[in-house]
Image (cartoon, rainbow, N blue to C red):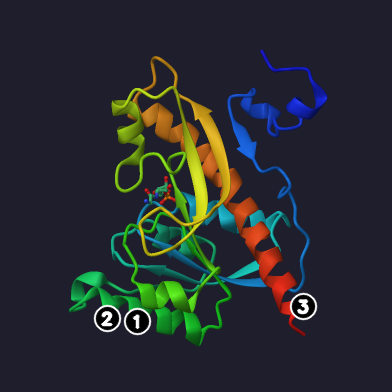
Amino acid sequence: MKPQNKEYSENYLFNDLKGLCLISPTDSVKPIFEPKIRLGILASGNGSNFEYIIKAIKNNQLNAEITILIVNNPDCLAINKAIKYNINYVIINHRICDSRLEHDNLVMNKLEELSVELVVMAGWMRIVGERLINRFKNRLINIHPSLLPSFKGIDAIQQAIDKRVKITGCTVHYVQKEVDSGSIIIQAAIPIKQDDSKETLTKRIQEMEHIILPLAIAKVAKDIRTIVRDNK
Ligand code: GAR
């Protein structure tokens, strides 16, 4: 049952999910900032997070424009979403690069060429090097399907199932050199049900990812805008 205490219940943001999740912090529900932030999205997979960023922009929940989708994999389904929503995209295939540095540089050059202000890894399955990380310091964020610092790296959802934890979740964090280790921006906690399969749990985690990623983008964008104003 959902607790009735006011302060506590305010943390249950999304009643339609029947209290089956907890998002924190909740101060980032709709940060206001101007002008629009220029986003670069990096993706390797289905692109559902990419699509929910687009929806958040279309619904006026996020004051942003997506200047480019960069994918590293030519078969990535995120491309279909870019086509559907008429968003500029480019394939920078890591398999045709001689080194990680060469791939990172191609990605970085494209982001710089388009004056991207905030880079969002939305299902990006590649480690990036220090040069790119430093170039976008405090402006490069990633979404990961676990309650970090638990279950870093690949197949985080299966890792949580294997460890038989009772609560898992998803995290948006700044990217730093060590994988899945940068400071945490926002998290959602999700109970694991006894009869959960990897598929059912993945579905619930992704529903929460689609909510917290736009919130995290808005929170970081507001910080970027505030820092720019303070420096003027
Ligand atoms: C998301 O669940 C995201 O958290 C995960 O990949 C999925 C991409 O889904 N990312 C990682 O595991 C990164 N370590 P999508 O392509 O449908 O947005």
Residue lying at the far right in this picture: please name it.
6
Q: Position of residue 153 (x, y in %)?
A: 32, 48
Where is mark 1, residue-wise?
Answer: 105
Q: Is mark 1 on a helix, strand or loop?
A: helix
In the displayed structure, 99 sits above or below 160; it is: below
User: Dot 3 surroundings within 10 Å: few (below 14), some, or many (20 or more)?
Assistant: few
Tell me the tag on residue 39: none
Where is mark 2, residue-wise?
Answer: 102
Question: Does the beta carbon of the residue at mark 2 sit less than 8 Å from ligand 1?
Answer: no
Which residue is located at x 37 percent, y 56 percent?
A: 77
Q: In which quarter of the image is residue 102?
A: bottom left
Residue 36 appears in the picture as rendered = no
Q: Are marks 2 and 1 in contact (CB under 8 Å)?
A: yes
Image quarter of the C terminus = bottom right
Sequence-wise, the earlier of marks 1 and 3 is 1
Where is mark 3, residue-wise?
Answer: 229
Q: Is 199 positioned to the left or the right of 7 in the image? A: left
Separation of marks 2 and 1 at Cα, in angstroms: 5 Å
**Amino acid type at mark 3:** Arg
The mark closer to the camera, 3 or 2, is 3
**Amino acid type at mark 1:** Asn
**Amino acid type at mark 2:** Glu
Separation of marks 1 and 3 at Cα, in angstroms: 29 Å
